[in-house]
Amino acid sequence: GERQGACLGVKNQVVALVPSDSKGATVMDRPTLGFVLPKTEATQAELRIRDENFNVVYHTTFSVSGTGGVIGVGIPASAAGLEEGKSYSWDFALACEGDRSADLRTTGLIYRMTAAGSLAKLDGLKPEARVDLLAREGVWYDALATMLEMREKAPQDRQVKAEWEELLRSVGLEP
């Protein structure tokens, strides 16, 4: 018989962990982006980051488990970093075998800002305080990356779970 595409029948979409306006900032030259993946048969995902002139500055394809859940996708040290004061757009897709037009996609914007003022003191802070400061200053991607690290180190910790939910709600996302 005919083989169904890996994304057919998937009711949920890929959810980008970004503020409700799809914009976020970072002080990192190689930030981490976060996504919630639906349960699917797709085995590959793709991330593209473009500069203000639509030139691709980073592109990667990687394997996903298909079980769904939260993932963080970081830009590796081997890739060129994002430049301060510049905006970028990104496109993330769960690749559907056969029919790529059926890929589950999401897009967003990221602005690389300068770590000035209170943000210059980030290094000495504990992760919880770092998340609070970053979120307060609107540095979404870095608050998210720190929170993803905390969740990875202590997945069963109730305090970490509560802070995760609070961070998501702060930008209009449902935990």
Image (cartoon, rainbow, N blue to C red):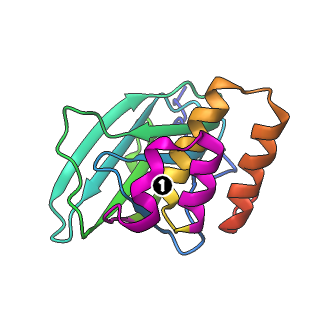
25 above or below 123? below
Based on the displayed image, in which of its 4 quarters is residue 125 positioned?
top right
Q: Nearer the viewer, residue 3 or 170?
A: 170
Q: Is residue 44 above or below residue 36?
A: above
Query: Tag 1: residue type?
Result: Tyr
The quadrant in which residue 56 appears is bottom left
Check if residue 164 falls in the magenta segment.
no
Which sits in the foreground, 126 or 72?
A: 126
User: SS for tag 1?
Assistant: helix
Residue at screen point 58% across, 61% down: 135
What's the residue at 54%, 42% (across, down)? 146
How many dots with numbers? 1
Q: Position of residue 34 (x, y in %)?
A: 52, 47
Task: Name the residue located 24 percent from the left edge and 69 percent from the top edge.
Answer: 86
Is 122 magenta? The answer is yes
Q: Which residue carries the number 1 mark?
A: 141
Image x and y of residue 14, in percent? 57, 50
Q: Is residue 104 visible?
A: no
**Residue name at image x 17 percent, y 44 percent:** 80
The magenta span reads 110-136
Q: Overall secondary structure of the magenta stretch?
A: helix
Q: Where is residue 72 drawn, in percent x and y?
A: 50, 39
Residue 160, quarter of picture:
top right
45 vs 76, left or right, is right
Q: Is residue 10 visible?
A: yes
Q: Is 36 left or right of 80, judged from the image as shown?
A: right
Question: Can you give x and y, in whole percent of width and height, for residue 175 in the image?
Answer: 76, 52
Q: Is residue 114 left or right of residue 130?
A: left
- 10 Å neighbourhood of mark 1: few (<14), some, or many (≥20)? many
In this image, 159 relative to 133: left or right?
right
Quarter of the image where the N terminus is located: top right
